[in-house]
Image (cartoon, helix red, strand yellow):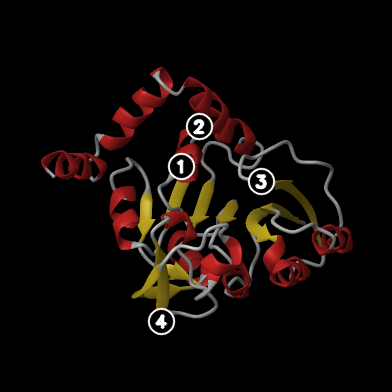
Amino acid sequence: MHLRTLLSGIERSRWYHPIHDAYLRTVKRRYWNDHVLGLRRFYRQFVSPGSLVFDVGANVGDYSRAFLDLGARVVAVEPTPELAARLKNIRGLVVENCAVGDKPGTVQFFVSSASHMNSLVPDWTALAADNPVQTSSIEVEGTTLDRLIEKHGMPDFIKIDVEGYELPVLRGLSSCPHCLSFEFHSEAREEAIACISRFRDSKFSYFMGEEPQTLGEPVSTEAMIEIIANLPPKQYGDIFVTHR
């Protein structure tokens, strides 16, 4: 019990990330090269020094830290109180402990034993998880992308990963940045198609799976909708929207 308390204290301290990075570099070298450094290599095409980035659904901060390392100014948005508290230990990161949707106000947020499955969608774990995990719900404050833009400025890039709630998040955005990305799941393809359809004069690219891969040539709205409509089951990834 004492060890667990000690480890929990380290996780909440500003020393957690430097210690964790040193561990990955020395013990988990392949993970460090492929995932940690890989994120930086991939997102360099969207993020440059001085860019303003919104990381909506920041979770434990892997992407936020990659954006910071690329020289960006980063606003991490995370509704889970414990995760938001940990994010505040990352030097230079601006943290908004709230959910994002199509209107401000208090909302029900469903918390899972696997934090990456936390969602504003009540039955999300049953829909998207291979082994559904028990969830509870808490009340959190909600805002919109428009309000975040009013507060922090227009971002150069927005990363949206909110476990099935991407469409309401985009409904709260009335002016588009140069580029944004949002997660998609084949089990929620209608929602993904509705997200794509909001951007009629944009170009789209995507990657499948959890690890960012090289993006293919950009395609039109219609072509991206066709790709998503024909996905086999249990497919997911991120769609990138480049706004003209």
Question: Would you name the residue on which mark 1 appears?
Answer: 62
The location of residue 193, given as percent across then percent down, is 76, 68
- Sequence order check, earlier mark of 1 and 2: 2
Closer to the N terminus: mark 2 or mark 3? 2
Kindly identify which residue carries mark 4: 105
Helix, strand or loop at label 4? It is strand
SS for tag 2? Answer: helix
**Label 2 sits on residue:** 36
> Residue 36, percent across and down?
50, 32
Q: Is residue 26 left or right of residue 238?
A: left
Kindly identify the amino acid type of the residue bearing the numbered disc 3.
Gly
Left or right, 130 with respect to 114, comes to: right
In three-dimensional space, the C-alpha distance between marks 4 and 3, rounded to whole angstroms, equals: 33 Å
Residue at image location 75% in from the left, 40% down from the top: 215
Query: Quick one: 79 or 73, which is closer to the camera?
Result: 79
Look at the numbered discs 1 and 2 and tell me whether their residues touch, using CB distance below 8 Å. yes
How many angstroms separate mark 4 from mark 2 (CA)?
Answer: 35 Å
Residue 226 on image: x %, y %:
87, 62
Name the residue carrying label 3. 209
Nearer mark to the viewer, of 3 and 1: 3
Task: State which tag comes first along the sequence, 4 or 2.
Answer: 2
Q: Quadrant of the C terminus?
A: bottom right
Q: What percent of the width, then of the height, locates residue 106?
A: 38, 81
Task: Name the amino acid type tagged 1.
Answer: Asp
The 10 Å Cα crowd at callout 4, few under 14, some 14 to 19, many 20 or more, is: some
Q: Residue at x 29, y 57 (%)?
A: 82
Q: CA distance from mark 2 to mark 3?
A: 16 Å
Q: Earlier in the sequence, mark 4 or mark 3?
A: 4
Camera-nearest label, 4 or 2 = 2
